[in-house]
Image: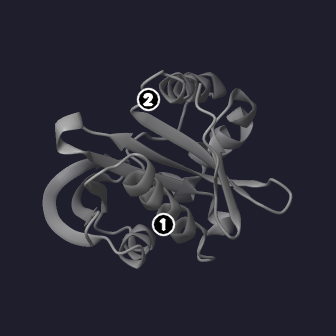
Amino acid sequence: MNTIILKTERLILRPITLLDLDYVHELHSLKETDEFNTLGIPNNIEETKLLLEKWIFENNKELATHFTFAVELNTGNQMIGLIGINLGKVKYKNAEVWFKFHKDHWNKGYATEALKEIIRFGFEELNLHRIEAGCAVGNIGSISVLEKTGMTREAHTRKLLPLSSGWSDNYGYAILATD
């Protein structure tokens, strides 16, 4: 069972639980967070529950390769978003990171702070060599977060992401343990 809890100056990153269902459903149902989301808005809370159960199952594997965290403010345990790191092939020692924050908590540095901690966790505790991320070319907020954490834009892939607005180009970012 995943009992990993990561802490930053303002945040607590803890494993997601079924108690987070209502918040995760609200987060995934927001028009603003759906704009660059490839999952789409869930049809109902049961759809969200299936996704949450999958994340919990992956978190709790003995040799976990996917870690999904609830992001909370460390003052009052208010959940403000989600962040995850998914390991790639063992030989390559790489992973992909992702994040989604409630619109009420945008432009406050929380996503950057949480991602910096996930990157630290990946390099120092998971012994990774490379951490990657991708985002739609129009997702200015995520681009800013990725670049503030020291990630380098390495790729521009055409029409990769199936968004609600249609196919979007994707920027690929990465950071190395040696950066």
Q: Is residue 111 left or right of residue 166?
A: right
> Residue 7's spot in the image, x, y percent?
65, 58
**Residue under the image location 35 percent in, 53 percent down:** 165
Residue 97 vs 10, above or below: the answer is above
Q: Which residue is mark 2?
A: 64
**Colouring of the image:** one colour
Instruction: Give the residue type at disc 2.
Output: Ala
The tag on residue 177 is: none
Q: Quadrant of the C terminus?
A: bottom left
- For marks 2 and 1, the one nearer the N-term is 2
What residue did someone put label 1 on?
A: 116
Front residue (pair 158, 131): 131
On screen, residue 138 above or below 124: below
Q: Nearer the viewer, residue 92 or 81?
A: 92
Secondary structure of the residue carrying tag 1 is helix
**What type is the residue that disc 1 sits on?**
Lys
Count of numbered tags: 2
* Residue that protrudes farthest toward the right in the picture: 76
Provide residue 35's location: percent of width, then percent of height.
Answer: 45, 56
Left or right of 173 on screen, residue 84: right
In the image, taking residue 74 as reference, residue 112 lies left or right, namely left
Would you call the spot at circle 1 few (<14 residues within 10 Å), some (14-19), or many (20 or more)? some
Under circle 2, the secondary element is loop
Query: Could you say where residue 163 lies in the image, as x and y percent from the top left?
Result: 34, 49
Residue visible at 54% across and 24% down in the picture:
60
Answer left or right for 74 relative to 170.
right
Contact between marks 2 and 1 (CB within 8 A): the answer is no
- Horizontal and vertical percent position of residue 91: 17, 38
Q: Nearer the viewer, residue 60 or 104?
A: 60
Q: Quadrant of the N terminus?
A: top right
- Can residue 89 be seen at all in this image of the molecule? no
Point 38% across, 67% down: residue = 139
